[in-house]
Amino acid sequence: GPAVLACKTGSPIIPAFLIRQKDNTFKLFISDPIYSPQTSNELVEQDMIVSVIREYIRVIEKKIREYPTQWLMFREFPVK
């Protein structure tokens, strides 16, 4: 959803994370904006969306690695 909207409107995605501190306050982290690639004949819309999604995932994975105890699964995650 966010990647499609960003590609169609040219708006960036700005990843933001709230990390709970030991004193039950929160620290806000705002990452660099993720812009969709410029339109060109070589990049079709689907490729642009995939590019934005990959960058978004990279940012989220980095934050989860930094704060693994802050990540919560709302459903059972199958381990293979």
Image (cartoon, rainbow, N blue to C red):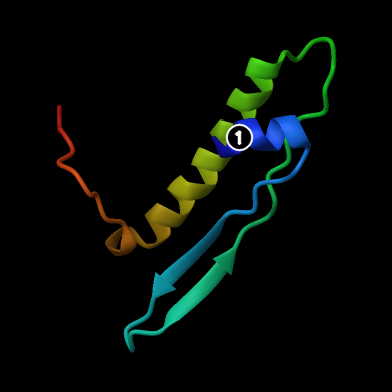
Task: Tell me residue 17's x, y (percent).
Answer: 49, 63
Name the spot of residue 67 as percent of width and height, x first: 37, 62
- Name the foreground residue: 22 vs 3: 3
State the residue lying farthest toward the bottom. Answer: 23
Q: Tag count in the figure?
A: 1
- Tell me: 69 left or right of 21: left
Q: Quadrant of the N terminus?
A: top right
The residue beneath circle 1 is 3
Which residue is painted at 26% across and 55% down in the image?
A: 72
40 up-or-down from 3: above or below:
above
Task: Answer above or below: position of 37 versus 59.
Answer: above
Q: Quadrant of the C terminus?
A: top left
Identify the residue at horizontal 60%, vertical 34% (top origin). Answer: 3
What percent of the width, then of the height, locates residue 7?
A: 71, 31
The residue carrying pointer 1 sits among few (fewer than 14), some (14 to 19) or many (20 or more) residues within 10 Å by Cα, namely many
Image coordinates of residue 2 in percent, x first then y, are 58, 39
User: Residue at the location (65% across, 35% down)?
Assistant: 5
Q: Quadrant of residue 40?
A: top right
Residue type, mark 1 in image: Ala
Q: Going by the image, does 52 lie left or right of 23?
A: right
Check disc 1 and report its element: helix, strand or loop. helix
User: Please, is residue 1 above or below residue 59 in the view?
Assistant: above
Q: Quick check: 70 above or below 74? A: below
